[in-house]
């Protein structure tokens, strides 16, 4: 009887153990399936993250290349600007030198023309028969300026001052007032200047006393002493 009870207990124990094993096996399968599913989802997410990282790396590389291109363009523009500035400065210096040379050439030409005109007048006077000397006409002689001939504006010093050159400095003095005529028309009077500083025998500085409306003094405009 005891033996039968022992066998029965042993069989029940085996059955319980088998049931427990089966239950544990079932639990393990469920856990494995869950974990497999989670690992699959995790791998999918890791794949998406990898793709995003790859795309970001490509975008970073593109931005770096763009920055390099912009830097190269900036350096090219800076070099071009420097070259342009140098060219403009050189051209400005060349133009200024040419202008100064042209002004000097014009001054020399006018001086030569004045000298030639004076020579022609002297030659013409010498070729004419002698005639009685006429009574002296009113001139600057009363002011001690007899013999002063016309000259021209050699420089525009400022809005109020000009430089003048005379063929001869005889009678040239500070305070002497002179009419200014347009260079292209020696009969068109456009203003008055007054000598303020005698620089040498032929050159002086003069103050602008009057300018007719709509006119302005220019290089080579003619100057003649005022009649008393």
Image (cartoon, grey):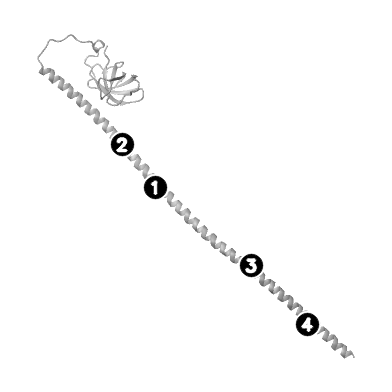
Residue 162 screen position, x and y as percent: 32, 23
Q: Are marks 2 and 4 in contact (CB under 8 Å)?
A: no
Outermost residue to the top? 135
Mark 3 to mark 2 CA distance (whole Å)? 78 Å
* Residue 8 visible in the shown view: yes
SS type, badge 3: helix
Is residue 33 toward the left or the right of residue 196 in the image? Answer: right
Q: Which residue is mark 1?
A: 79
Residue 24 screen position, x and y as percent: 75, 77
Q: Tag 4 or tag 2, which sits nearer the N-term?
A: 4
Mark 3 Cα within 10 Å, few/some/many (few <14, many 20+)?
A: few
* Residue 201 visible in the shown view: no
Q: In the image shown, does 26 or 76 lie closer to the viewer?
A: 26
Q: Tag 4 or tag 1, which sits nearer the N-term?
A: 4
What number is the disc on residue 95? 2
Label 2 vs label 4, nearer the camera: 4
Mark 1 to mark 4 CA distance (whole Å)? 89 Å
Q: Tag 2 or tag 1, which sits nearer the N-term?
A: 1
Mark 3 to mark 4 CA distance (whole Å)? 35 Å
SS type, badge 1: helix
Quarter of the N terminus within the rendering: bottom right
């Amino acid at each position: 009887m005891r033996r039968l009870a022992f066998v029965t207990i042993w069989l029940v124990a085996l059955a319980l153990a088998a049931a427990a094993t089966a239950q544990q096996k079932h639990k393990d399968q469920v856990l494995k399936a869950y974990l497999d599913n989670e690992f699959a989802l995790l791998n999918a997410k890791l794949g998406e993250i990898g793709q995003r990282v790859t795309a970001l790396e490509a975008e970073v590389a593109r931005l770096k290349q763009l920055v390099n291109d912009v830097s190269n363009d900036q350096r090219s523009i800076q070099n071009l600007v420097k070259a342009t500035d140098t060219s403009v400065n050189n051209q400005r210096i060349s133009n200024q030198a040419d202008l100064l040379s042209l002004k000097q050439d014009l001054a020399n030409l006018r001086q030569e023309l004045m000298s030639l005109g004076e020579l022609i007048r002297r030659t013409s006077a010498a070729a004419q028969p002698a005639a009685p000397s006429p009574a002296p006409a009113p001139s600057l002689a009363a002011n001690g300026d007899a013999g002063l001939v016309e000259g021209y504006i050699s420089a525009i010093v400022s809005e109020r001052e000009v430089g003048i050159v005379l063929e001869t400095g005889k009678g040239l003095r500070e305070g002497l007032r002179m009419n200014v005529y347009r260079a292209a028309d020696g009969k068109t009077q456009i203003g008055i200047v007054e000598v303020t500083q005698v620089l040498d025998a032929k050159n002086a500085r003069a103050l602008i006393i009057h300018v007719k409306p709509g006119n302005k003094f220019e290089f080579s405009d003619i100057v003649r002493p005022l009649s008393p």
